[in-house]
C-alpha cells in the first residue's frame, strides 16, 4: 500500500467526521456569505511575468516538521511581497497537520487569493473550501482518472462558487501523465506540474541514477523541463516541487512556467522565512513586466 493510499484513507475518515458534525446544508449557507479576495486566483497569477504561490504548512511526509517560527510569521511575510501572488493553505490534518480553520485564519489576515490544497474528491470539500474563504482549490488529476465525470463535476461546482481550480498533474494514483491530461477540462486555465515520481521512462532512469548518487534528481530542472510539454501553451503553467533557491525561478520562467508553488524552501528549519522569501521576491521583481 502506497503513502498516497494511506493519506486518502485518513482523509476520508476525517471527511466523514466533518460531515457528521456539520451537515452540508450548513456549509453551503456559510459558503454563500464567505469573504473572498478582490482579485481572483487566476487573475493574480496572470498579473506578472512570474510569481509565487507561497505555501503554509506545518509539516510534510517527506520533509518532516517545518520551523514553527517560520510557519507563524509566514503570512505576514507573504503579505509584504508583491511577487507572492497567492497563498496556498494545506488543510490535511493527519499528514500535514493542517485544518480548514487555517483557511479562515488566513482569510482574516490577507487580501491575497487563497488556494485550498488538500486531497479533494468530494463536493463537501469544495463547499467547505469556499465557506472558509478559499478562492481556489487544488484538484489532483491522478485521483480522478478512473472517474473523469467526478473531476468535471468538482471543477464546475468550484466555478459556480466563483473559485478557480489548480489542476495538478502528478504522482497521485497509478495513472500516466498522458491519461491525466485527458481528463482535465479544456476550459481550465491553471495547470500545475508536480515533478515528483512521474511514470515516464526518461525520468525513471534519471531518478534511478540520482538515487545511486544519493540525490533525488527527479525533482530538479530536468523533470520540470520534461513535463512542461504536457501543459498546453495557452494555460498558466505552475511548477510544483523541487524549487530550492531564487535562481530556480529564472530557469522555470525560461521553460514557460508562469508561477511556482513553494512551501518547504520557505518554511524549513535553518533560515528565517522573511530572508528566504525576500531573496526569491528580489529575483522575481528583477524580471521584466508582462507585455500589454
Image (cartoon, rainbow, N blue to C red):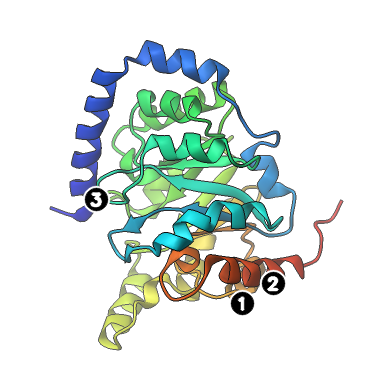
Examine the rendered structure and indicate whether residue 130 appears above or below residue 119: above
Residue assigned mark 2:
283
Does 67 sit left or right of 157 as displayed?
A: left
Disc 3 or 2, which lies upstream in sequence?
3
Question: Label 2, label 1: how many angstroms apart (C-alpha)?
Answer: 7 Å
Disc 2 or 1, which lies upstream in sequence?
1
Identify the residue at the far left of this view.
1
Q: Which residue lies at the image location 42% right of the left edge and 68% below the top edge?
A: 268
Disc 1 or 3, which lies upstream in sequence?
3
Q: Which mark is residue 247?
A: 1
Question: Relative to the observer, which residue lies in front, 27 or 166?
Answer: 27
Q: Which mark is residue 4?
A: 3
Q: Which residue lies at the image location 57% right of the left edge and 71% below the top edge?
A: 276
In the rendered image, residue 162, in percent from the top left (x then y), is placed at 59, 25
Examine the rendered structure and indicate whether residue 265 appears above or below residue 25: below
Residue 137 visible in this rendered orientation of the protein = no
Q: Mark 3: few, some, or many residues within 10 Å (few <14, many ≥20)?
A: some
Examine the rendered structure and indicate whether residue 182 appears above or below residue 220: above
Question: Label 3, label 2: how many angstroms apart (C-alpha)?
Answer: 34 Å
In the rendered image, residue 243, in percent from the top left (x then y), is placed at 50, 69
In the rendered image, residue 126, in percent from the top left (x then y), is placed at 43, 28
Amino acid at each position: 500500500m502506497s503513502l498516497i493510499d494511506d493519506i486518502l484513507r485518513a482523509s476520508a475518515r476525517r471527511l466523514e467526521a466533518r460531515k457528521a458534525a456539520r451537515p452540508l446544508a450548513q456549509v453551503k449557507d456559510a459558503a454563500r456569505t464567505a469573504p473572498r479576495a478582490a482579485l481572483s486566483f487566476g487573475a493574480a497569477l496572470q498579473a506578472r511575468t512570474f510569481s509565487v504561490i507561497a505555501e503554509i504548512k506545518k509539516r510534510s511526509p517527506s520533509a518532516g516538521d517545518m520551523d514553527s517560527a517560520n510557519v507563524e510569521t509566514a503570512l505576514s511575510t507573504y503579505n509584504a511581497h508583491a511577487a507572492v501572488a497567492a497563498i496556498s493553505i494545506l488543510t490535511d490534518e493527519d499528514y500535514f497537520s493542517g485544518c480548514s480553520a487555517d483557511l479562515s485564519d488566513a482569510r482574516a489576515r490577507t487580501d491575497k487569493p487563497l488556494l485550498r490544497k488538500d486531497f479533494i474528491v468530494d463536493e463537501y470539500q469544495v463547499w467547505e473550501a469556499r465557506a472558509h474563504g478559499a478562492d481556489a482549490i487544488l484538484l489532483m488529476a491522478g485521483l480522478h482518472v478512473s472517474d473523469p465525470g467526478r473531476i468535471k463535476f468538482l471543477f464546475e461546482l468550484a466555478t459556480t462558487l466563483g473559485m478557480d481550480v489548480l489542476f495538478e498533474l502528478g504522482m497521485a494514483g497509478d495513472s500516466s501523465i498522458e491519461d491525466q491530461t485527458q481528463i482535465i477540462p479544456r476550459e481550465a486555465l491553471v495547470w500545475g506540474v508536480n515533478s515528483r515520481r512521474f511514470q515516464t521512462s526518461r525520468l525513471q532512469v534519471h531518478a534511478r541514477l540520482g538515487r545511486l548518487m544519493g540525490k533525488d534528481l527527479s525533482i530538479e530542472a530536468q523533470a520540470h523541463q520534461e513535463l512542461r510539454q504536457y501543459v498546453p501553451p495557452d494555460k498558466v503553467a505552475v511548477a510544483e516541487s523541487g524549487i530550492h533557491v531564487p535562481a530556480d525561478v529564472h530557469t522555470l520562467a525560461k521553460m514557460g512556467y508562469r508561477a511556482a508553488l513553494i512551501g518547504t524552501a520557505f518554511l524549513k528549519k535553518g533560515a528565517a522565512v522573511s530572508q528566504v522569501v525576500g531573496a526569491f521576491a528580489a529575483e522575481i521583481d528583477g524580471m521584466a513586466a508582462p507585455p500589454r
